[in-house]
Amino acid sequence: MLLSVEGIDAHYGSAQVLHNVTIKVKEGELVCIVGRNGAGKTTLLKSVAGFLHPSRGSILFDNEPMQALKPEKVALRGIKYVWQDKRVFVDLTVRENMELAAYPAKADLDESLERLFSISRKMRTQLNSKAKGLSGGERQILLIGRALVGNPRLLLIDEPTEGLAAKVIDDISRILIEMKGRVSMIVVEQNLAIVSQLADRIYLMKEGNVLEEITERNLILDQDYIESLL
Amino acid sequence: MGAGQVMIKKFSDSGGLNIAVMIIGFTAFAYLASVNKVTDFIIFCIYVLGFDLLYGRMGRISFGHMLYLGAGAYGAAMSAKYLTPDPFLAILMGIACGATVGVLLGPIVVRTKGAAFALINVAFNQIGYFLVLVALARYTGGEDGVSLKFSTYGFLNFGNVHFLFVFCLCSLLLVYYVMQRLKRSAFGALLAGIKENEIRVRFLGYNTLVYKWIAFIMSTSISAFAGTLFTLNYGFTNPSFIDPARNVEVIFAALIGGPGTELGPVVGGTAYMVISNYLARYITRWELFLGLALLIIAFRFRKGVMGSIQDLMAKRAQKT
Amino acid sequence: MWEVVAYGLTIGGILYIISIGFSLTFGSMRIVNFAHGLIYAVGAYALVTMLPLVKGNFLLAAVLAVLISLPVSYIIEKFVIRRLYGKSIDYAIIASYAVLLMGVDLIKWIWGANPLPLSDPIGKNLAILSFEIPLYRVVIILLSFLIFAGLSLFFKKTMIGKIVVAGLQDREAVQGLGIDIDKYFAIVFLLGSALAALGGMLYGPISTVHPYMGFRVVTLCFAVVIVGGQGNLRGTALASYVLGMVMALTAWFWGPAADAMIFAVMAVVLIFRPIEF
């Protein structure tokens, strides 16, 4: 088991946002977390990433406990976050965004850039433009490229297709499917069609609880069924 | 519970116990030490109550509250000097001055919070200080200030040390009582809500700006009231009543007493006054000591004296 | 007229040097650092103390003074700022205020409460167009431009600079890449403090060196940050020079109103651009 989140509770101040949450991710898997707004999906990702420390329970990565680590230490262990809302460093160029990712990971910048270009050839032309000028889809790709620097073992991806046009969604989906096997992923998604394409397994969350785990292929493909459970 | 016990409980719940403590405490102190000095302490406590309305009850710390104290002090002084030496009119004018400043500055100030709120009050304090010291020096007497003589009405004589003491003590109790009613009112609950999570209160449909503004005006008015009493007590007014450097006094007092608690401002105000009056005689570097105490409070003693006592009592109640 | 402009640029330059550190700390840690004013004062007082020891060599004394201020700011950062920022921002402002108070009293204790004289180290005037301006002021103006250029380069071209720029924008994202952003913000804090000390030294000869100079400068810095935007290099520079001009102009008409005018400007800015933090 690559990642094992066991029975965590999380609080924002005095409000409890996660209740006894348990999820597991095997090496090479793509697990989707599905739920309505406010279900605690992002909070779960933040807890794994070290931005929020659970008040109860444990998080094991490669059998090493890491629920008390600071976020930068978590990242160095090989878990990278792909942010919601396409959050890139807007005042820096594409190249500089990648530079910042390569620096702490001591990764080769050119190699990382090549990998970015293999995901999207268009990035080569955008290399020296400020990230502010990128479209939503391009930003998402940059975020993924940034997260892949240093060859992480696990990616935490928060709503990658939100706000994107249909064609771009297809591109992103294709990129994620291609990455399967080389890196494990937890993907938070509200778009159930995408979830059906991507997921090896699905966790359903509601109001800070994990409702269900869906492992059967035909159920994963059944969007109505998933919808009904939420 | 017997009828007597019910009465006692009601008395203490409504703050009656605290009022009794204050009456007995200050009176005893006055006769043991000096009536004049203790009157000074009492007035300062009124000021701290006004300050704590914003800090303890609404969560906004002002680093420039001397402006409002000064507005009251000078409002009263100008009224006595240029209108009529009637002390009661002076008080009203002083409070009106403070309230006006609150009305005018409110819309700018209450939109901010945290650090911005703290410092924008400083900035206005500096402007006020400048006005009093330089710009309007012709009227305010500049650096020297103004000396005043107030008219007397039989026993209503602000020159009489004992009358002053009683008047100020009653004023303190009045302000305290108003604060109590406020705390238990819907308005008080709203302020507490704003302190904890303003956005949520806004989502519930309240125009938080208006409520903050009102609280601000109340705070400036109470502080101004204290200012008028200082003027009456001393018989003069000068720029030290609006000096931005003195803001540390009320901040320290509010913090050490226990922000947001009922008796905290009074305890803290008295504590500060005792330290600055008596400790200063023995330790020359008492301001260094004050800064150090403030630092320790910021790290380890955030609830202040009354806050910690409340915590202790709550823990004991839990055990039974 | 030109004298006013020159004077305004001088004040603006000094304001910039002092405020940039304050602005960066505010932008990165959301802390109003009153202790910044203390370092400013320490710079000036250290200079006054060093001067007789180096037989009047202003440059050497200045360097030494900055070096003296560094451990002071390091201690403040490590024991006060770092402990409080993030979780207890409301108390950070009180704590930094307390530090300033303590520092001011220590200064009074060591050097006395009276203002200390510090004279123009160059003492010569430069003749430009139809007027004369003390060469010292020209040096200050040039120095401030140099520092601006230097900082711009630093933030655009160096790795540390880029990390800080990214961190000011989006702290979590930087952490998520594996970078301990706190360490970098601490470096920025020290840099900003050193600049504050420099500012104190530069301003000393033009105004007075007295124990309460720190308090005054903090409110001025805050005004610069409000007008120019926090953590924003260019905005801080622009606001500094604009406010410097305001001060010079006001001082020309009505000397004592200079400070008050700055705050009036700040209040106006706040009406039209209310901040929420």
Image (tube, coloured by chain):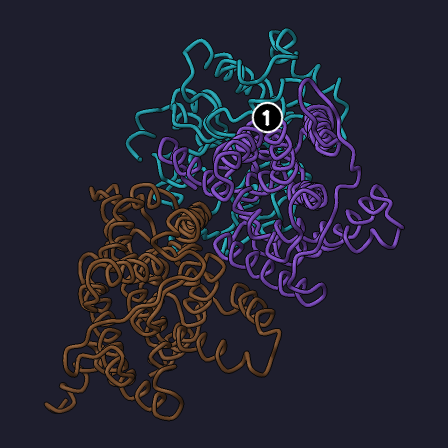
Q: Residue B225's quadrant in the figure?
A: bottom left
Q: Name the residue nearer the viewer: B172 or B134.
A: B134
**How many badges with numbers are in the image?**
1
Most extreme residue toward the left is: B3
According to the picture, the residue beneath numbered tag 1 turns out to be C5
Does residue C146 appear to the left or right of B14 in the view shown?
A: right
Screen quadrant of the N terminus of chain B: bottom left
Disc 1 packing (10 Å; few <14; some 14–19; many ≥20)? some
* Residue B76 at least partly seen: yes
* Residue A13 at least partly seen: no
* Image chain in cyan: A
Position in image of residue B285 (x %, y %): 62, 73
Q: Residue B295's quadrant in the figure?
A: bottom right
* Image chain in purple: C
Does residue A111 appear to the left or right of B53 in the view shown?
A: right
Screen quadrant of the C terminus of chain B: bottom left
Relative vertical location of residue B159 with respect to residue C88 in this rendering, above or below: below
Most extreme residue toward the right is: C55
Relative vertical location of residue C58 with respect to residue B169 in this rendering, above or below: above
Q: Name the residue nearer the viewer: A20 or B92.
A: B92
Position in image of residue B35 (x %, y %): 34, 86
Taking the spot 30% from the left edge, 35% from the top edge, the residue there is A229
Position in image of residue B272 (x %, y %): 45, 74
The hue of chain B in the figure is brown
Q: Chain of mark 1?
A: C
